[in-house]
Structures are given as structure tokens and as C-alpha cells.
Image: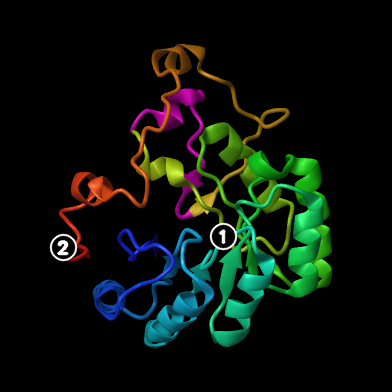
């Protein structure tokens, strides 16, 4: 499970905000038990000191990873957080150039690299990044949040890349019609992604569904706008359901 327990925090958190965030993680851990991995998402918005202090509070809940604890564009800050915490750090979804991934690897600023093929240049660049990371024994967990075509490319990439450990798919929690953008592909069966069997990516676009749902600008409120707490949850103090 991956979730963000930090409300509308930005850079610094009060002691009460930290206690609230810890309480959410504690409730989730209690609800799901010890065998479910918890990925704690920060969306790159804490200062180094705050990210470290908050991370230390999360140690008892054994995060599978702590994702983008600080701004994604400062790999030095990420490295500083990484050196201070005992659990894996994940990052990389907002890196765009091969040179950025090279520096990330040279610094060993994280443990799990979340490259997004739709951001960093596609399958060919993805394979170059994977080869570079394999030499440094760094794992991959590809990011994907934009739809079934990008997901299909990521699934092909994952099956061809030994150090890919898990594949993100935001589409299942987005809108009901997202998967209908392609004809008949149901990629996840029994908890594992299946490769299409047709040539190329192996999927066919559904032009009618795409035309029926034109792009919208900024369909979701900002993370720093508390409307999302009211619109997408029961409020900032609500307890997560099991």
C-alpha cells in the first residue's frame, strides 16, 4: 500500500502535525498487519531536517520505502536524508535526463529508482538507466500515473528488466473509464501484470472513448489546497479504513 499521510504540510511540520501523520501510519499498520508493505509518499515537499525527523518517527512501522521526502530536484538533499534513515528511500519519477539518473546513481541518493518512461524518454532511455543502476545494485519501481498506454510500456519494461521489483498503476484509483482508452486489455491477473501477446506494445486505442473524455486542465486540487482533504477524504482527522 502506498499513501501520503502528511495533509497539506509544506517544508516544515509542527509537532502536532507530525503526531497526526504518525498516527495515520500507525492506524494503517495496525489495520493491515505486519505482512503488508507500506510505502510512505511525501511528494517531495519537506525540508531535509523535517524529513529526517518525520522519518525517524516512522521507523517502528517499518516502511517499505519513504518516497520523495525532499524536493526531487536536489539530489544532494535527498542523499542527506538517505544517509540518516535506516529504511529504503525511493525517488526519481520527476527526473527527466540520463545525466540526472547518472548523478543519482553516483551519489547513491536512494535505494529504489522510480523512473517514469513517459517522462524520461521512453523504453530506450529506460533500458540505459536500468543497465547503469544494475551495476550499482539499485532497484527499480517504475512510476506510471497517466494511462494504459504508458502502463503497457512500463509492463514490457518490467518483464525485461530483472531489478524491477514492483509496478505502480495509478489508473485503478483514478476514473472508471481510464482503462477503456484501450480495447480489451486487462493487465493485472492474480496480482501480477501480464504481457500483451500482439505485436508492438500489443494494445489498440479506443478512439471513441478517448474522444468522449477530452483532456481537462488541472482536474485535481493541489496537495497544498485543503479542498482535497474535504473532497477526497472524510476530512483531515478521519481514520483510514482497513
The span shown in magenta is 176-191
Q: Label 1's element?
A: loop
Residue 36 among those drawn in magenta: no
Q: How is the image coloured?
A: rainbow
Disc 1 or disc 2, which is closer to the eye? 2
Mark on residue 166? 1
Q: Is residue 230 above or below residue 59?
A: above
Q: Nearer the viewer, residue 16 or 186?
A: 16
The quadrant the C terminus occupies is bottom left
- Mark 1 → mark 2, Cα distance in angstroms: 29 Å
**Residue name at image x 38 percent, y 85 percent:** 57
Q: Is residue 197 above or below residue 28?
A: above
The quadrant the N terminus occupies is bottom left
Residue 237 as seen in the image, left or right of residue 70: left
CA neighbours of label 2 inside 10 A, class few (<14), some (14 to 19), many (20+): few
Question: Residue 217 sits in which quadrant?
Answer: top left
Residue 110 in sight in this render? no
Q: Residue 204 in the image: x percent, y percent? A: 59, 22
- Residue at which label 2 appears: 238
**Residue name at image x 57 percent, y 73 percent:** 89
**Secondary structure, magenta segment, majority class:** loop
Among the two numbered marks 1 and 2 on one chain, the one whose residue lies closer to the N terminus: 1
Mark on residue 132? none
Residue 77 as seen in the image, left or right of residue 2: right
Residue 190 among those drawn in magenta: yes
Q: Residue 214 in the image: x percent, y percent? A: 43, 18
Q: Is residue 121 above or below residue 108?
A: above
Q: Label 2's element?
A: loop
Question: Residue 239 sits in which quadrant?
Answer: bottom left
Residue 241 as seen in the image, left or right of residue 18: left
Amino acid at each position: 500500500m502506498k499513501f501520503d499521510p502528511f495533509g497539506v504540510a509544506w517544508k516544515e511540520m509542527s509537532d502536532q502535525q507530525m503526531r497526526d501523520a504518525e498516527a495515520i501510519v500507525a492506524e494503517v499498520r495496525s489495520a493491515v498487519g505486519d505482512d503488508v508493505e507500506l510505502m510512505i509518499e511525501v511528494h517531495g515537499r519537506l525540508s531535509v531536517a523535517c524529513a529526517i525527523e518525520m522519518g525517524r518517527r516512522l521507523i517502528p512501522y517499518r516502511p517499505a520505502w519513504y518516497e520523495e521526502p525532499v524536493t526531487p530536484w536536489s539530489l544532494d538533499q535527498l542523499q542527506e536524508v538517505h544517509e540518516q534513515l535506516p529504511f529504503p528511500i525511493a525517488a526519481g519519477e520527476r527526473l527527466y535526463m540520463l545525466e540526472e539518473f547518472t548523478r543519482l546513481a553516483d551519489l547513491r541518493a536512494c535505494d529504489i529508482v522510480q523512473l517514469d518512461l513517459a517522462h524520461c524518454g521512453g523504453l530506450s532511455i529506460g533500458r540505459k538507466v536500468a543497465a547503469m543502476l544494475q551495476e550499482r545494485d539499485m532497484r527499480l519501481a517504475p512510476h506510471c500515473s497517466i494511462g494504459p498506454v504508458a502502463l503497457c510500456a512500463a509492463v514490457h519494461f518490467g518483464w525485461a528488466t530483472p531489478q524491477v521489483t514492483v509496478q505502480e498503476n495509478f489508473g485503478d484509483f483514478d476514473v472508471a473509464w481510464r482503462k477503456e482508452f484501450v480495447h480489451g486489455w486487462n493487465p493485472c491477473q492474480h496480482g501480477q501484470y501480464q504481457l500483451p501477446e500482439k505485436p508492438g506494445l500489443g494494445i489498440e486505442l479506443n478512439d471513441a472513448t478517448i474522444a468522449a473524455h477530452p483532456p481537462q486542465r488541472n482536474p485535481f486540487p493541489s496537495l497544498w489546497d485543503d479542498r482535497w482533504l474535504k473532497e477526497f477524504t472524510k476530512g483531515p482527522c478521519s481514520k483510514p479504513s482497513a
